[in-house]
Amino acid sequence: MPDVDTASPMEPDPSVVAEPLLDAPRLGVIPGLIWAYRILEDGTASPLAVDQPIDHSRPGWLWLHLDLTNVPATQWLARAGLPQPAMATMLSHDRHQQLHAAGSFVYGILADLVCEVHGISEELGYLRFIMTEQLLMTGRHHSLAAVEATRATIQSGATRLTHCASLLELIVEHLADGIDDIADDLAAKLDEIEDQLAVRSIGLARRNLAGVRRTSVRLHRHLSGLRAVLNRLERQGVQTLDPRLQLRAGRLVQRLDELDRAILEIRERGYRLQDEVSATITEETNRHLHLLSILTALLLPPTLVAGVFGMNTKGLPLTEQNSGFVWAMVLVVGSSVVAYIVLRLIGILKPRE
């Protein structure tokens, strides 16, 4: 199933205005709030206490990040007076990436890599957001790599954010950085697989290659979905929005295009290595069959000799001689030698170059 919401089931009504609660001077204590930042006009960010009332009347704009697994947080969102399509998106478990612009707000869902205890995984989680001129509210069900990286960036003061859209762009850029790191890891794994094939470690190469191909396919699908929703937003006319809500979709798409080409190269390289693995396995199978055929040909004459001397009939040669067993064994060995010589003469046992 594709990750693109090509036909949104809930097209927003442009007449719907931003929610009164989020425009209120004080938002109160927000349940399930993971972190909150106030970004001032100069682009600097200062953290806010999550257990204290949020004052929306002070200068600057806010980034509120919610835990959507927290039941009181979802109840608060349901009562927040959000426009119906935006509220449905924030509270849904939809796994389709989507971006929608409606007058004074932008909302949607973006896929991101999940953070686990041991580090960033290759599994995908989903960031849900609504953005107004003075607020970016995001929510998630799992810890997300790009969101965590964005928080670290603004907290360290490494970048200055001029408006809400620049923060959302920064999240997408960190998302691309995370995929870029995974692409580098995949390329290194392909180098290891080539070394394994060189030393004929076919089983290990097959297992590692299967993981690389599966990851590259999933990343390509993820990038294609994100590029599609950004292109769709640009076609819908992002220039009609307030400048503080305008995403630089073209620049983001260009970055994602470059990254997707790298992923496609890794995928194609994986296909070529898979063909090499299949050819190597076929070669090994043919070699084993060739060896089995030779053994069968060498053992067939001795089996025939043993079968003749094993017949319970009168008149068998050597049955009355004390050295009959010795002569029978000579015939058994000699028949194998004759079969070997014949195979060499007809070229089946030619030395391998």
Image (tube, rainbow, N blue to C red):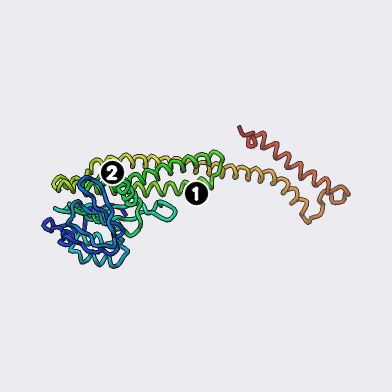
Q: Position of residue 286 (x, y in %)?
A: 56, 43
Could you tell whether 351 is left or right of 257 in the image?
A: right
175 vs 63, nearest the viewer: 63
164 vs 199, nearest the viewer: 164
Q: Position of residue 234 (x, y in %)?
A: 19, 45
Residue 159 tag number: 2
Residue at the spot 62% in from the left edge and 34% down from the top edge: 352
Q: Circle 1 — which element?
A: helix
Considering every residue shown, the one lying at the far top of the view is 353
Q: Position of residue 107 (x, y in %)?
A: 22, 54
Residue at the spot 70% in from the left edge and 36% down from the top edge: 341
**Where is 110 relative to 75, above or below?**
above
Query: What residue is shown with label 1?
Result: 207
Residue at the spot 60% in from the left edge and 44% down from the top edge: 288
**Where is 299 relative to 71, above or below?**
above
* Rendered image quadrant of residue 157: top left
- The answer to whether any part of residue 233 appears in the image is no
Q: Circle 2 — which element?
A: loop
Residue at the spot 81% in from the left edge and 54% down from the top edge: 314
Quadrant of the rendering where the N terminus is positioned:
bottom left
Could you tell whether 106 is left or right of 196 in the image?
A: left
Q: CA distance from mark 2 to mark 1?
A: 42 Å
Which residue type carries mark 1?
Answer: Arg
Mark 2 nearby-residue class (10 Å; few <14, some 14–19, many ≥20): some
Mark 1 nearby-residue class (10 Å; few <14, some 14–19, many ≥20): few
Which residue type carries mark 2?
Answer: Thr
**Where is 10 relative to 341, above or below?**
below
Considering every residue shown, the one lying at the far right of the view is 322
